Structures are given as C-alpha cells and as structure tokens.
Image (cartoon, rainbow, N blue to C red):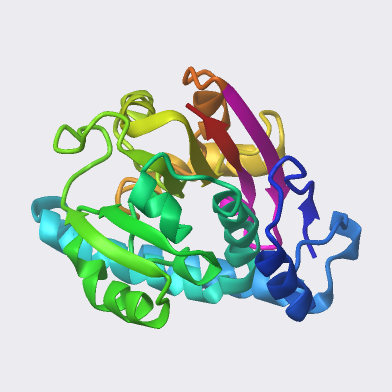
Amino acid sequence: MSRVRTLTATALSKETTEKCHSHPEKTLTLSTAESISLFDWMRIFLGHVCFCLIGLSGILIFPALALSLRVREIFFAFIYLVMQRLWYDDYGSVRRVVMTGLDNIVSHDASLRAQGAVRVLEVGAAYGPNMPYIHRKIEYWRLEPNVSFEPEFQKNLAANKKVQLVRTVRGYGEDMHMLQDGHFDAVILTYVLCTAKDGGKLLSEIKRVLRKGGRLLFAEHVGHPKGTRARFLQDTLAPLVQYFTGGCYMNRDSGALLAKAGFSEIKMDEVDINIPCEYSYHVYGYATA
C-alpha cells in the first residue's frame, strides 16, 4: 500500500515476528504511486474534506484559539485523535516497525535486566498510540504537556499491560531538567518535532537522558523534497494551519535535524504513505547515543 524501505538493521524478536505473521494485512509492503487503489484515493479525498472542516472550525473559534492556551490544547487533542483514527493503519504501519527497535535492547539497570524489561521515556506521548505495538515489558515514563489526552491515554494504558507507567511529567522536551542524565535505555519520539519550538535543543536533551549506547526511536512526518508540487502545497499552507494544529509545521525537514543532532549512529528510512500529501511523507528509524 505504501512506498517503504523497512528497517533491516533493527532485528525483530521472535515474539514480534510471530505477531507480524499473525496480522499480515498490517505489514508494510513495497508499492508505487501507480498501485494506489480507488479506495485509497477515496480515503485521501475524505482526508482533504476533513482538513477543510478542521480549518473552518479553527477559523470560527480563532479568537478563542488566539487568546487561550487551554482552548488550543483541547482543540489540538481533538483533531489529533480524529486524524490518528482516520489513518490508524497508515500511521500504525510506521509505528509498528519503529517499536520493534525496543525488542533487542538490554537494560543498563540490573533489576530491570533480570525481568527482561527496559526503561523507556516517551517524549510527547499524546494519548499513547505507540502502546499497542510494544511487545515487551517496559518501565514507562512519559513527558506530555497536554492534559486533554489523559482520558484516552488511560484507556490505552489499561489495554496494554506490558507498559508499566512509573511517572508522568508535564512539560516540553526542550527542558527535561527534572530527569537524570543517562537514565533511560530508550526514548520514543513520534510526530513531535513538527511542533517543537527548538528541535535541536529537544534532541540534545534526549541525548542527555539516554544512557551511553541507548536508543532513540523516532518517526516524523516531514516536508516533501523541495521542488515538488506536494512541497509547494506544504510551504503554502504551513504558516496558516499551524495555528489550528498545536503549532505543527507540515513542511519541517526533521530528518535533516535528526541527522545533524550528534548521535553516534543513525539509521533512517522514509515512506510516502497513502494519506493526503500534506502529511504523507515520513522519516523513521533509530539513533544511538
């Protein structure tokens, strides 16, 4: 369904491989734009209709959005949930591959290692959409400023017993001073850099809290290659829609930001999934501290 090059450097555990084989319809496959079905085109069209409705709603309540951070948080949480559910399988196919990067990590903490668990921080956890794709026991810490995600987060947490929540921190990734240096075996960062006020500082903080050899697992929607019609559309719309999408810039080159963040190793791939082109181009992979 999507144009994908999978992460061959991240080995799948036996359990994850079995889960993938038991749900073959959800696996990532190689295809080209010419193979997009009529059903896919209908979904893309309905996605643009959804964008228009969101934009219209944002215009109608713009004074409240401009004046109140709380209103912006509520509105963003609502549209994020709508979009993630509308394209659950599409985003999920990327999340699913990225989360296999947890499977072969060995914790630096002896007590967790004895349990076969790892300590994980998720930055910008939202409502926890990565949880269903985690197939091992983890000690889970989350950083999330928006309390509007809380009800849906608790539902996801209750449904995913291998995720053991230890602490919730209300804040932004650019300032994680409350977290110790080298404390985490892995950090999860999915679809966050598009809204970051200072992506370089956020990635620097992630490197600080990761143990030496720890792994950052990431996925981000990014700008299409420059010179394409899709990129022109992104560049035109980005300054306008960011007011309605929690500060999200659809045209950010987050892949370049990750590449120059100073990790000792980075494995990055890309996919153009079959959703509206404004958000269809993604980079994903892992980086080692």
- Picture residue at 64% right of the left edge, 47% below the top: 281
Give the number of marks.
Answer: 0
Residue 118 location, x and y as percent?
42, 52
Question: Relative to residue 258, is residue 5 drawn left or right?
Answer: right
The answer to which quarter of the image holds residue 78 is bottom left
Which sits in the foreground, 58 or 113?
113
Q: Is residue 275 magenta?
A: yes
Q: Is residue 264 above or below residue 152?
A: above
Q: Is residue 269 magenta?
A: yes
- Picture residue at 20% right of the left edge, 57% below the top: 167
Residue 102 location, x and y as percent?
54, 52
- Picture residue at 34% right of the left edge, 51% below the top: 111
Which sits in the foreground, 198 or 14?
14
Magenta segment main secondary structure? strand
Find the magenta span and give its range.
Answer: 265-284
- Picture residue at 69% right of the left edge, 74% below the top: 19
Quarter of the figure with the N terminus = bottom right
